[in-house]
Amino acid sequence: MTIPFSKYQGTGNDFIIVDNRDNIFSKNNTKLIAQMCDRKFGIGADGLMLLEKHSEVDFRMVYYNADGNESSMCGNGGRCLVAFAKALSVIHNSCTFEAIDGMHKASIEENVVQLKMQDISIIDEQEAYTFLDTGSPHHIKWVDGVDDINVKREGAALRYSQLYGEAGSNINFVEQKSPDHFKVRTYERGVEDETLSCGTGVTAAAIASHYKGLTSFKEISLDVEGGRLSVTFEKNDSGYTNVYLIGPATYVFKGEW
């Protein structure tokens, strides 16, 4: 079977996207997904997404890591899927969709997507790191000289450590550049390497930095290897609400597999 696809990227975090509203894609074929995502023998991507019909909201997001396994929420993927949905005329400039972690609202203007993330009420702050779940689990480690970190080696060591067991965690190395500006590098589980950007990772870094008292700003700029994202939020007694991940989502090309 021929599978039409589109390729999108959000600050270098790249995705294969398939319009699966007519159920053309074999969702349990882990080997196929991994092969399509392979950068030498396939199309090449950090993950693959399906846009599917939903009975109550605009669409459903189904996300797979590059290893072929269905994954937790992907923030940059969600933003790219919104851009894809607009290109298909499934939506206009705003939408509601369901992902693995629940419902999300989003808006798009030109190629900039504002994606509402889940509220965050539980943050585990330790002396050496902070852990929180922003739709995906994230370990935040603050460092000096983030550009000098061997992210693949140090990230893998933490991802596979006894701290997180078999499920593992995404690992983020964060350096503060100014009161409202941070740089983030992320080791992503499922990709098992550094990615150029991680949306749930920068969201976690922004929230953790505010929680730790490193910043009082509620709009934070975050540089990643593939560009710049921003995160906005509100803080109340129950935690963090109205959390938005904001950044570009760019069409790259389309083809057939």
Image (cartoon, rainbow, N blue to C red):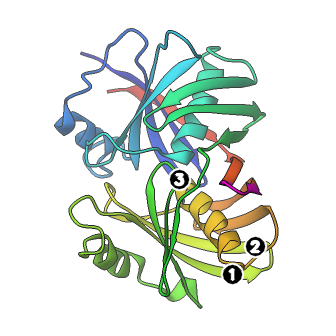
Q: Is residue 236 magenta?
A: yes
Main SS, magenta region, reads strand
Percent across and percent down for residue 72 are 40, 45
Q: Please report whichever mark, 2 or 1, sits nearer to the chain's N-terminal start.
A: 1
Say if mark 3 contacts mark 2, CB within 8 Å. no
Relative to residue 222, is residue 73 depicted above or below? above
Q: Residue at x 61, y 47 (%)?
A: 119
Q: CA distance from mark 1 to mark 3?
A: 20 Å
Question: Residue reaching furthest front?
Answer: 237
Q: Residue at x 73, y 82 (%)?
A: 177
Percent across and percent down for residue 139 are 45, 70
Residue beneath disc 3: 134
Q: Nearer the viewer, mark 3 or mark 2?
A: 3
Q: CA distance from mark 2 to mark 1?
A: 6 Å
Q: Is residue 174 magenta?
A: no
> Which stretch appears magenta?
235-239
Q: Residue at x 61, y 69 (%)?
A: 208
Say if mark 2 contacts mark 1, CB within 8 Å. yes
Q: Residue at x 26, y 42 (%)?
A: 69
Tag on residue 150? none
Residue beneath disc 1: 176
CA neighbours of label 2 inside 10 A, class few (<14), some (14 to 19), many (20+): some
Element carrying mark 2 = strand
- Identity, as a three-letter code, of the amino acid under mark 1: Gln
Out of 165 and 179, give the one closest to the viewer: 165
Percent across and percent down for residue 181 are 75, 73
- Identity, as a three-letter code, of the amino acid under mark 3: Thr
Out of 253 and 216, give the one closest to the viewer: 216
Q: Is residue 226 visible?
A: no
Quarter holding residue 2: top left
**Which image quarter holds the N terminus?**
top left
Q: Please report whichever mark, 1 or 3, sits nearer to the chain's N-terminal start.
A: 3
